[in-house]
Amino acid sequence: MGFFFAGSANAQEGVGIRAGVSAKPEQFYFGGHAAFGPVVDKLWFRPNIEIGVGNSITLIALNAEFTYWVPLRKDPWNVYLGGGPAANIFTFGPVGGRSTDVRPGFNFLAGIAQRSGLFSEIKIGAIDSPSFKFGIGYTFR
């Protein structure tokens, strides 16, 4: 359950943790990520899993996201933009009568990451992904 983000095209692969809040559904989420790359130039593959709880729904989001890194010269921070498809597993209903549904989604994301590993990002969801997410996390290298 790991995920990663690169501080720059020279960053090493890694795994990390993340947490945040989402809208539609309104939830708290936590998860992990891994980073692989660069695939080409400054493009990294960063799959992640996010588990959302709240609003009588449990959501497990399996995200296959790509990020393009924009290093900021002489600054410990880098900016990244990206997106990718998602498989969203919704479980809802009262205990004893819960049902599960798998729905497709797509995420667009933007974030800022410190070279040491700390990051913050926002996601805008399409199809059946949560409409908005704000999260923070840390990547271990």
Image: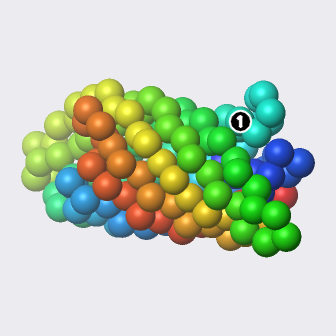
Query: Percent from the top left, x then y, of residue 76?
Result: 79, 72
Q: Provide the residue designation for mark 1.
A: 43
Query: Percent from the top left, x then y, of residue 122?
Result: 45, 58
Q: Nearer the viewer, residue 105 or 82?
A: 82
Which of the image's four quarters has the C terminus?
bottom right
Q: Residues within 10 Å of mark 1 (few under 14, many from 20)?
A: many
**107 sits left or right of 130 in the view:** right
Q: Residue at x 43, y 42 (%)?
A: 108
Q: Quadrant of residue 82?
A: top right
Q: Residue at x 51, y 60 (%)?
A: 121
Q: Residue at x 51, y 53 (%)?
A: 110
- When the figure is inspected, residue 45 is found, relative to residue 50, above or below; the finding is above
Q: Quadrant of residue 133?
A: bottom left
**Is residue 116 shown to the viewer in this render?**
no
**Is residue 104 shown to the viewer in this render?**
yes
**94 sits left or right of 11 in the view:** left
Which amino acid type corresponds to the residue marked 1 in the rendered image? Leu
Q: Nearer the viewer, residue 44 or 22?
A: 44
Dot 1 falls on a residue whose secondary structure is strand
Query: Percent from the top left, x then y, of residue 63?
Result: 49, 37
Q: Nearer the viewer, residue 18 or 5?
A: 5
**24 sits left or right of 2 in the view:** left
Query: Percent from the top left, x then y, of residue 106?
Result: 38, 34
